[in-house]
Image (cartoon, rainbow, N blue to C red):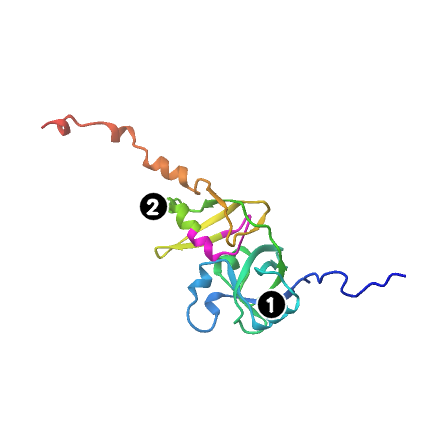
Amino acid sequence: MFQFGFNMFPEMPRLFNTTYRVFSVAMLPGNERQDVENGGKIIMPPSALEQLTRLNINYPMLFKLTNTKTDRKTHCGVLEFVADEGNVYLPLWMMNNLVLEENDFIQVESVSLPVGTFSKFQPLSPDFLDITNPKAVLENCLRTFACLTTGDVIAVKYNQKVYELCVLETKPSNAISIIECDMNVEFAPPVGYQEREQEKKPTEEDMVVDPADLMP
């Protein structure tokens, strides 16, 4: 007769699924936290860390955020566990993506995401192309992000100016982890780029040369 031990199967990580009140980083008590505002990570309460540890959650800790009223979703990492109990603090761009107001409720679930191999962005302003090396600037800013979600509009800060970029595409899935990954980055033409180029094109009047200008 066979006897089966209780530890025959390895313990599987259980899901973390909790509802919190949500606030923007600006509402976080203490000093201004630009490190949170300029990235893709949130601040959670200490009890969340205790619960995540008990649940045997895999690292890196990644989460799906859902506004249950609108069914808007995004994904993020966690920066610190220092929030007041029952609260989480999000960057403003993330609040906007989820259509959240201060003191709304948000559902936070632990997830496992595939490592990203490709992402495509569309700047929402042609001004982004005025940066000397926009691709290098974006790749540097993405180091403060843990994941990307197709359809999100993220915000990156460079030289005291905030640029918004829409995440048009991510591979191998619509939500990817970008922590220490080798990912190809591409750009689509910025919103309003064609209009600006047309404004720059010289008119026939501009091309007419006054003979006096050619005189020595």
Q: Secondary structure at mark 2?
A: loop
Nearer-the-camera pick, 61 or 100: 61
Seen from the viewer's position, the closer of residues 206 and 171 is 171
Residue extending farthest to the front is: 1
Residue at image coords 35%, 57%: 160
The magenta segment is 140-153
Total numbered labels placed on residues in the image:
2
Q: Report x, y in % for residue 39.
A: 47, 58
Please report whichever mark, 1 or 2, sits nearer to the chain's N-terminal start: 1
Q: Inspect this view and state whether residue 99 appears.
A: no
> Quick check: 94 above or below 21?
above
- Closer to us: 125 or 5: 5
Q: Position of residue 101 (x, y in %)?
A: 54, 63
Q: Residue at x 54, y 69 (%)?
A: 81
Q: Amino acid at mark 2?
A: Thr
| Residue where numbered disc 2 is placed | 132
Q: Residue at x 25, y 31 (%)?
A: 206
* Place of residue 167 in the rendered image (x, y in percent of width and height, measured from the top left): 51, 47
Question: Alpha-carbon neighbours of circle 1 within 10 Å: few (<14), some, or many (≥20)?
Answer: some
**Extreme top residue here?**
211
Magenta includes 151?
Answer: yes
Left or right of 12 in this view: 70: left
Quadrant (top left/top right/bottom left/bottom right) for the C terminus = top left
Residue that numbered label 1 is attached to: 20
Q: Is residue 205 above or below residue 153?
A: above
